[in-house]
Amino acid sequence: MFGSRRRYLMILSLLFLVLWGMLAIDPHDRQDWALENALLVIFAAALVVSFRWLPLSRISYTLIFVFCCLHSVGAHYTYAEVPYDAWAQTLTGRTLNELMGWERNHFDRAVHFSYGLLLAYPVRELFLRVVNVRGFWGYFLPLDITMSTSMLFELFEWAVAEIVGGDLGIAYLGTQGDVWDAHKDMALASLGATIAMAATMAVNIYLQRDFAREWADSFRVKHPEPLGEDRIARMLKNKP
């Protein structure tokens, strides 16, 4: 099973490297492309390093693969310039913005939504296997982490835009003149994660025989003793 999972990951990795290599050729803005790919390189390195001691499921690797592909497309064109309207017009004769009544490029919105939709499940797998959470917390904590990391990324974008400044900072931030851009991005990521966790819970309700018992047990108090000053007092008392 371990070898099969490794082969599957190698196939996904090779497919992604081919796509990434093609999109690395003559991007719309080389500096913005480099900024957009900085976190991706760190993330990919972490996945490779962690494979030996924490290989994820094929579902998780597939979801991560799809998200990374979407991000690579956004990095190639810059998120505000992805020509999905031209693609839609070629296929259907009408632009997507015209069909939906949009006035801005919404590719960045789609990727923020996909961040929650596609990455909440891999985060849940980490919580279940490393932290050993169960029941309610196995759905809430992945949602919470997705929401908080989405907020942290918006702060990171703001910091980078302030540091690099000029047109590069504007291209990287990608607000397209919307003062509520960061709020909408975080809301969409949260919505995507909520849908992912709701779907996961629905599957588990159907397949997991002890779902109700595990859910109820997750609210049971495991350690009745208070913490805070009481915990400090106990630690001082037991200190040699």
Image (cartoon, rainbow, N blue to C red):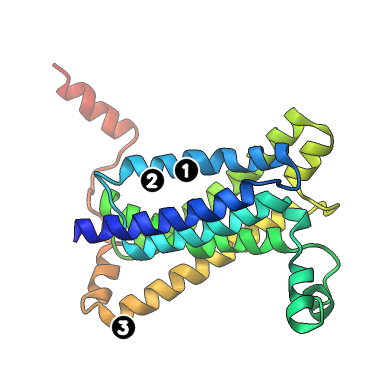
233 lies left or right of 97: left
Name the spot of residue 103 as percent of width and height, x first.
86, 67
Q: In which quarter of the image is the C terminus?
A: top left
Residue plotted at (38% across, 61% down): 60
Q: Where on the picture, by quarter, is residue 152?
A: top right
The residues bearing labels 2 and 1 have C-alpha atoms spaced at a distance of: 6 Å
The reply, left or right, for residue 112 in relation to residue 40 is: right
Q: Where's residue 59, x and y in %?
A: 37, 66
Instruction: Answer with mark 3 or mark 2, whichever residue precedes in sequence.
Output: 2
* Quarter of the view holding residue 139: bottom left
Instruction: Say which of 136 and 235 sits in front.
Output: 136
Residue that lies at the very extreme toward the top in this rendered image: 240
Which image quarter is the N terminus in? bottom left
How many neighbours does mark 3 have within 10 angstroms: few (below 14), some (14-19), or many (20 or more)? few
State the residue position of label 2: 47
* Disc 3 target residue: 206
Is the C-beta separation of discs 2 and 1 under 8 Å? yes
* Relative image position of residue 10 (x, y in whole percent): 35, 54
Measure how far apart labels 3 and 1 are at the Cα level: 33 Å
- Is residue 155 in view? no
Using the image, tell me which numbered label, if any, was put on residue 43: 1
